[in-house]
Image (cartoon, rainbow, N blue to C red):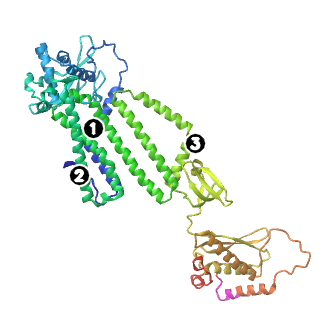
Amino acid sequence: MEVQKSLATAVPRKGASVSFLFKLIGLWLCCCGLWAAPAQAQEAAADTVAVEATVPNWPDDSLGRRTPRGTVEGFIQAISEQNYVKAALYLNLDSALQQPQRGEKLAHALQRLLDQGGEILPYAFISDTSSGRSNDNLGPNLDRVGSATVNGENFDLFLEMIESPEGGPIWLFSSQTVQRIPVDIEQASKPIADQVMPSVVVEKKWGGVPVGHWLSLLLIAALAYAVAWCIIMGLRYVLRRTWKKAREESVAGLIQAFSLPIQLYLALRLAIWASQTAGISIIVRQKFSALTIIATVVLFLLLIWRLIDVFGLYLQRRMIARRHQAGLSAVLFLRRGAKLAVVVFGVIAVLGTLGFDVTTGIAALGVGGLALALGAQKTVENFVGSVTLIADQPIRVGDFCKVGDTVGTVETIGMRSTRIRTNDRTIVTIPNGDFSSQRIENYAHRDRIWFHPTFGVRCDTSPEQIRYLLVELRAILYAHPKIDPTSARVRFVGIGASSFNLEVFSYVLTSDFDEFLEIQEDLLLRMMDVINASGTSFAFPSQTLYLGRDTGLEQEKTQSAEEQVKKWRENDELQLPRFSPERIASLRNTIPYKSKDEK
């Protein structure tokens, strides 16, 4: 019920599936107790790696008591052989308790205490250095290795370091711990497992342990799995019935991803608790201690693996819906890379738990990875470039753009390169590393298009004619319905070698380039009519040799343009240097023009 309440409180009312994910991860870590386990693993690893700079030349201890782990392993091995004389040598017996029979009884009693609910830390969490664990706040001569219960009172099991007669440290179960062990072995009650099992499987032993304990452990594991399965299935049923989002595909995928790892870990914890309660021999439980750590690590990595699949499938569907091939390729690549990292981390963690020195392997892996990265530098560069293109999205498939000197339409964005279809209908392939570092001009995101021709009229054009052109050309821009009036302007910008230059500046209210070409064509023709009506003409940058008499300017048109300007000046209607707002309003949309949508 506590797990059910915790899971219910972890479900958000209105949050998205990502919020739900983080809460479930928090629940998983709380249930598994992985907040403490990694810390213990790191401490043990630090103890293993922290080798003294100069190791004294001590003689070897025949019982392996130079380190805390060696002492615990030796004690477990001795009681499994039922050699309690040897087991007593791992206890720190004071001078009053030096009788051999007393030591044997205490060793046997300690075994019984451990069998009936006591525990020893997994070997991977016990220091394997002669100095012991230095960061446990217990002092330099004490290490905690487990706990036991006497008369309902729980106490810790400590090892203490003493100096051997031959020199060097020796680790023994501390005198304080030995004093807490019942002197009389009969004070330790018979384990529950021995009480309920037939006498034949209790008396017959295998590996120093009754055969019934091995069989009971298998039965407990099966029952724990069944109970955990029922609990998880019940929780999933309650979630589906009480929470609507649990029936949605994304949230259902998250629940499915969490279900199996939590179920297996819950079964593991139930099996450990039941084996301690039933009094399964510490010898059996300690043989499987490393497996419990490995199972915890594997289950956590299984959870990460399943979450990678869930989010990978979610992102795949989004990329497919958007027809984003490059994004889809990146998702598949990153999902494979993440799974590979999970496998590598899992192998290293398992080998470290089993006692292998993984530092050399990690160093070799780092050197190999560096060499591979240097050899595949261009490949990595292109991959990073593709990730940049996907994340920043300066272009998309179908966009018309200019990249460096290449102009065309983007056809595909791959993991290594991007392909552009040019106006010549050729395909240009650009590596993504180069693509992402170049200047990219994307024409597809324009909200309007710039119309900016420059007209050069003949140098014999009179000032009045230029004023006429300035007024009439601006009037066309203001009157045209597809021109933004706030940007429209026509200016006399300079006198060239063979022309007077008039610059036209305005924005056409369209993002479709084909429509822009239609509007530009209409504007240019109208402006050509105005220039022709002014009596002047376009200037040519070439020299012309006239063999006949030049008729010069048409006097009638020139006089008409000058009279019009004179009339504007007399009536104070010369719209220079700028048009009045009233005049702009009167000209707006007076030119009949059919837009593309009206055809």
Q: What secondary structure is found at the residue carrying circle 1?
A: helix
Which of label 2 and label 1 is nearer to you? 2
Highlighted range, magenta: 566-574
Looking at the rendering, which quadrant does residue 86 occupy? top left
Q: Secondary structure at mark 2?
A: helix
Lower sequence index among marks 1 and 3: 1
- Which residue bears the numbered disc 1? 36
Mark 2 and mark 3 in contact (Cβ < 8 Å)?
Answer: no
**Residue 119 in sight:** no
Question: Crowdedness of circle 3 by 10 Å Cα count: few (<14), some, many (20+)?
Answer: some
Residue located at (23% from left, 39% from top): 222
Eyeballing the image, is 514 above or below 150? below
Amino acid type at circle 1 is Ala
**Residue underneath mark 2:** 234
Q: CA distance from mark 3 to mark 2?
A: 52 Å
User: What label sits on residue 378 in the rendered view?
Assistant: 3
Identify which residue, 263 or 152, lies in the foreground.
Answer: 263
For badge 2, the amino acid type reads Gly
Toward the right, the furthest residue is 547
First along the sequence among labels 3 and 2:
2
Percent of width and height locating residue 284: 22, 28
- The answer for how far apart the CA atoms under marks 1 and 3 are is 42 Å
Q: Quadrant of the C terminus?
A: bottom right
Residue located at (28% from left, 42% from top):
264
Could you tell me if the residues under marks 1 and 3 are in contact, i.e. CB atoms within 8 Å? Answer: no
- Residue 360, x across and y down, in percent: 43, 27
